[in-house]
Image: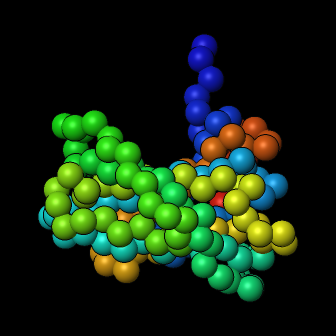
């Protein structure tokens, strides 16, 4: 029997827009998968904090690369680059309805353990923490914001 990814490789927070996600001590990194249909464009802002209450919250200007596509499986991902920033701005184009940005745990400042990505529009944000430090059955995974 094959091993499934949830609990072994990833944990997921499907409704993660503006939600603090534990990173340091929990996983090597997080992939934020975002979507806003209708070719509307959106702005996503990355922040870090010391705890799940948002203590010491500050922008985390480490995003230099992200990926976009239509989000419906009809096209390949397009790599986009920028100078290090805490924001990603997707264009008002169908080819940028979906966006994925990855954040490494090593990008966080000393003493910071949590990250969140917030949409300024109506975009959805799913946080997929990856390379879990402790593997568990899905029912035994800790809450991602704890």
Q: Give the residue displayed 31% in from the left and 72% down from the top.
A: 42
Q: Quadrant of the N terminus?
A: top right
Q: Give the residue displayed 43% in from the left and 54% down from the top.
A: 81
Q: Give the residue displayed 75% in from the left and 38% down from the top.
A: 135
The x, y position of residue 51, in whole percent, is: 76, 76
Q: Taking 93 as reference, is 75 above or below it?
A: above
Q: Is residue 7 visible?
A: no
Q: Nearer the viewer, residue 81 or 87?
A: 81
Q: Nearer the viewer, residue 114 or 41?
A: 41
The x, y position of residue 61, in whole percent, is: 59, 70
Q: Quadrant of the C terminus?
A: bottom right
Q: How many marks?
A: 0
Q: Left of 109 or right of it: where is 102?
A: left
Q: Quadrant of residue 9?
A: top right
Q: Residue furthest front?
A: 83
The x, y position of residue 46, in whole percent, is: 54, 71
The x, y position of residue 102, in whole percent, is: 54, 52
Q: Give the residue displayed 27% in from the left and 48% down from the top.
A: 69
Q: Quadrant of residue 76?
A: top left
Q: Residue furthest top?
A: 1
Q: Residue furthest right?
A: 111
Q: Quadrant of residue 47?
A: bottom right
Q: Is residue 65 visible?
A: yes
Q: Taking 110 as reference, is 107 above or below it?
A: above
Q: Left of 124 or right of it: where is 108?
A: right
Q: Left of 59 or right of it: where is 71?
A: left
Q: Left of 36 or right of it: where is 131?
A: right
Q: Nearer the viewer, residue 120 or 125?
A: 120
Applied colour scheme: rainbow
């Amino acid at each position: 029997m094959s091993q499934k990814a949830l609990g072994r490789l990833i944990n997921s927070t499907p409704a993660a827009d503006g939600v603090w996600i534990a990173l340091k001590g929990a996983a090597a990194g997080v992939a934020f998968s975002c979507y806003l249909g209708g070719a509307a464009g959106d702005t996503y802002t990355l922040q870090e904090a010391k705890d799940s209450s948002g203590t010491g919250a500050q922008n985390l200007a480490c995003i230099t690369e992200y990926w976009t596509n239509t989000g419906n499986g009809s096209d390949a991902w397009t790599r986009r680059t920028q100078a290090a920033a805490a924001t990603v701005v997707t264009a008002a184009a169908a080819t940028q309805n979906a966006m994925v940005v990855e954040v490494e745990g090593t990008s966080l400042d000393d003493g910071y353990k949590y990250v969140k990505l917030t949409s300024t529009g109506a975009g959805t944000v799913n946080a997929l923490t990856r390379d879990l430090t402790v593997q568990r059955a899905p029912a035994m995974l800790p809450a991602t914001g704890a």
